Amino acid sequence: MDFGEWDYNYNPIPFLEESKRVLNRYGSIIVWTSEQLFGIYRDWFAKNMHPKQTLVWVKTNPLPQFRLTGYRQATELLFWALKNKNTKNNPNFIFQSQKEMTNVFCAPIVGGKERVKDKDGNTAHPTQKPLSITKEIIRRHCRETGIVLDPFCGVGTTCVAAKELNRNFIGIELNPEYCKTVEKRLSIVQPNLFMNNIESNKKEEVK
């Protein structure tokens, strides 16, 4: 599938190095990865961090395979690694029960009202991830009032999930159209979010 120029010749190492630098001592990196890049992430984490586990999204409604020449792609992979070795003292890693202590998340491909559309009514982002999985990952790996960083935030699912869960967030996105979409989605979650930021900036200027 052709997702555009941004999906080719991607070198993840600079983003991994910078992400590790800004993590606090209990911080985690959780990255969505293709099968082609999985080995690069695994090797880098093994040399530079504390690799923990592979997480799996099982799609309950995978796309059909019309040619009947291979399996339907019903999974996507995530890799979890920590800045330091994990212990029970880690305030960012929160499990409540054995039931949630699995590395498998089941959810449908994003569709319906959750699927973000562009101004022409087309799919705004080809790889939008489910809000339900994003929220579950944040809930387990970041305490309330903690900070979630998404350096490739796309249409802002991570930002929305963090805000709904009372976590702070930093979202970075180069595409200006995606940035407008993120702003719109966040204004629904917290209508005064951007106005509050503007007012705060004005007060700082006055000082």
Image (tube, helix red, strand yellow):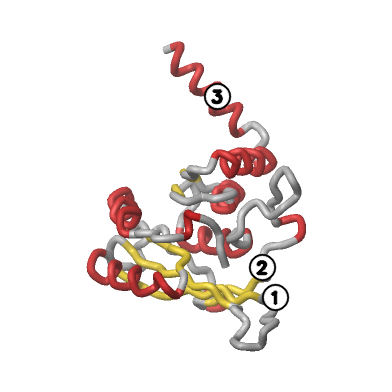
Tag 3's secondary structure?
A: helix
* Residue that badge 1 annotates: 61
Q: Is residue 85 left or right of residue 8?
A: left
Badge 2 crowding class, 10 Å Cα cut-off, few under 14, some 14 to 19, many 20 or more, is many
Image point 60% across, 34% down: which residue?
Answer: 193
Q: Amino acid at mark 1?
A: Asn
Q: Are marks 1 and 2 in contact (CB under 8 Å)?
A: yes
Q: CA distance from mark 2 to mark 3?
A: 36 Å
Q: Amino acid at mark 3?
A: Ile
Upstream in sequence: badge 2 or badge 3: 2
Q: Is residue 137 left or right of residue 107?
A: left
Closer to us: 127 or 187: 127
Q: Is residue 161 left or right of residue 19?
A: right
Q: CA distance from mark 1 to mark 3?
A: 42 Å
Closer to us: 180 or 19: 180
Quadrant including the N terminus = bottom right
Question: In the orientation shown, which residue stands out farthest toward the left?
Answer: 47
Which marked residue is nearer to the observer: mark 2 or mark 3? 2
Upstream in sequence: badge 1 or badge 3: 1
Q: Is residue 123 above or below residue 168?
A: below
Question: In the orientation shown, which residue stands out farthest toward the top?
Answer: 206
Q: Is residue 138 above or below residue 119?
A: below
Measured from the top left, where is residue 137 in percent x and y?
52, 63
Badge 3 crowding class, 10 Å Cα cut-off, few under 14, some 14 to 19, many 20 or more, is few
* Residue that badge 2 annotates: 109
Image point 33% across, 70% down: which residue?
Answer: 40
Q: Which mark is residue 198?
A: 3
Image point 32% across, 48% down: which residue?
Answer: 22
